Amino acid sequence: MNTALLTLSQLRYRAGGRYLLDDITALANAGELIALLGPNGAGKSSLIRVLAREFSDYGGDIMLQGISLKQWRGPALAGVRAVMPQHATVAFPFAAAEVVALGLPGRHSGNASHPAVMQLMRWLQVDHLAWRFYSSLSGGEQQRVQLARVLTQLWFTSGPKLLLLDECTSALDPAQQYRVMAVLSRLAQRGDFCVVVACHDLALAASFATRVWMLDHGRLVADGTPAQVLQRDRLENVYGITTEVQLRSARPVIHIKGCSESIPEMIPELV
Amino acid sequence: MTADVVRPNRSRAVIALGILLLGCALVSVRVGPFPITLTDIFNAFSTDMAGSREALVIRELRLPRLMLAALVGAALAMSGAVLQGLFRNPLADPGLIGVSSGAALAAVSVIVLGGSAFSTMGYVMPSFMLPAGAFIGALLASMMVWRIASRHDGTDVALLLLAGIAINSIAMAVTGLLVFMADDAQLRTLTFWNMRSLAQASWGDVLIALPCLMAVFFVTPWIARPLNALLLGEAVAGHLGFSPQRVKQIAVVSVALAVGAAVSVSGLIGFVGLVAPHLVRLLLGVDHRVLLPASALLGALLLVLADMFARTVVAPAELPIGIVMALIGGPFFLLLLMQRRRGI
């Protein structure tokens, strides 16, 4: 491949009179697991949603497989780009397998008996939940069912694919977070997936990501390996936290010592 | 240990519903003040018996009425199912959320305002004006409810039902005003229209209403899958490659056509759109590819039964079918509300 899977050039997105994304230029290739970091309001969700084509009134250019994102047709785009929402509520009593089957492309959509549904659910270890009501599952189980749905959507496309996840691990316990990240990492290692994960967990990003995009006030302030991006000064500038960062087998280990904005000493007393 | 969801064989269930509907239809043709036997039904279509009283009763009274009841039931049930999918809300029923009364108000306006406009010009109002008005009324009402109740993640139940209450009472008030303004000739038309039920059904009615009533049925192949995806949210449906905006347009227009036609041929009949899809979802699941045709069959079945009940229980008089449906549907709706209260 001579072109990158995803190219952002001078991407700008404006809403409510200010730039939520400002002059972002970056490349992403299949095989990468990119952690999208930055404080609240830095533009992580906006970037995911623009890449998901929820908005098309952006400036600059987004090219997916060398074709402008705006020119992709809906069904074709759905075959190479999938989006996992932060949390998905389902209004009606769907069984988990039926939710997964909604990801199947074209005329298979909704066929819960399609073999791919069970295969992916087994891989994500939720096959025993296939015929439970989705709404009765725990947060972590729902998350893995959604991941299975998103993967069924891309499963029938050969070649490079883009998977976007918006803070998909924020509601999960450490073991569940680790599990989801390990699955994503495995997919990226296979070589045909490019995974972009917006998240808040520096430790998770440091141990799984092959690349980190650090956003601050809508700007891409750093783009590189976790060791290059997650450095003491940058974390202080972007997040306002004081940290101690060590390198262990080329991956940073971050210890947070405090935040630069001091909290007033006095606890107000009831009068 | 929670039990697994069991989904019965869907095609078998749909076929069973179809057979049940046919059975009820046969019974419904036989039952009535003029006794009909099964052989009469078969004879009615043979040439040598065509002139008999039995054949006339079957062909000109019972059958068109049966067809209209089944068609209106199917149309309302499918409209309810589509609205519920679109609003992501199991309580959306064309009657409850004001779509039907929007259609009725428009129909009354056409009779009163349109009637006088045409008569001052010296013309008789063309007969398509009434269903056309009902269609536009249904369309406007559903767009208005949509605007009021939609939020980023679906629709708010409270806002949806409150908007329905508001539209229903506005429609009632304006209808009252129009009745007050109407002259004698218009009043007579209005009263006839208000009292109108399936009893006046003729083959003409059936043929005219058929394409509109079946509008939702015709678009099912295009909207069933996107409606399934929409249940996960508009954004997710977009990610899956569907165009939510387009589905909404197709769905709202076809529902307005169906409800408009149903209201203009049979007046206000509530709750079919609530009861039928709900029962189908309980039995067969939420997949719109099954839900829509199965709701159509069950809605037809419900209305055929209700109509049979309405015309036999106080025979030779008749109960309005709207009242019969409200007696079945009202308690059902209360039951649904109580279930939601307990968070089931």
Image: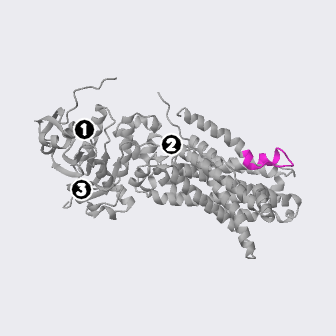
Give above or below for A52 relative to B5: below
State the residue position of label 3: A22
User: What span is in magenta?
Assistant: B308-324
Q: Which chain does the numbered disc 2 sit on? A: A
Q: Nearer the viewer, residue B226 or B118?
A: B118
Cα separation between marks 2 and 3 = 39 Å
Q: Which mark is residue A92?
A: 2
Query: In the displayed image of the protein, which residue is found farthest to the front?
Result: A271
Quarter location, residue B211? bottom right
Q: Is residue B37 magenta?
A: no
Mark 1 element type: loop
Q: Neighbour class for label 2 at 10 Å: few (<14), some, many (≥20)?
A: some
Quarter location, residue B202? bottom right
Q: Neighbour class for label 3 at 10 Å: few (<14), some, many (≥20)?
A: many
Give above or below for B257 relative to A134: below
Q: Which mark is residue A201?
A: 1
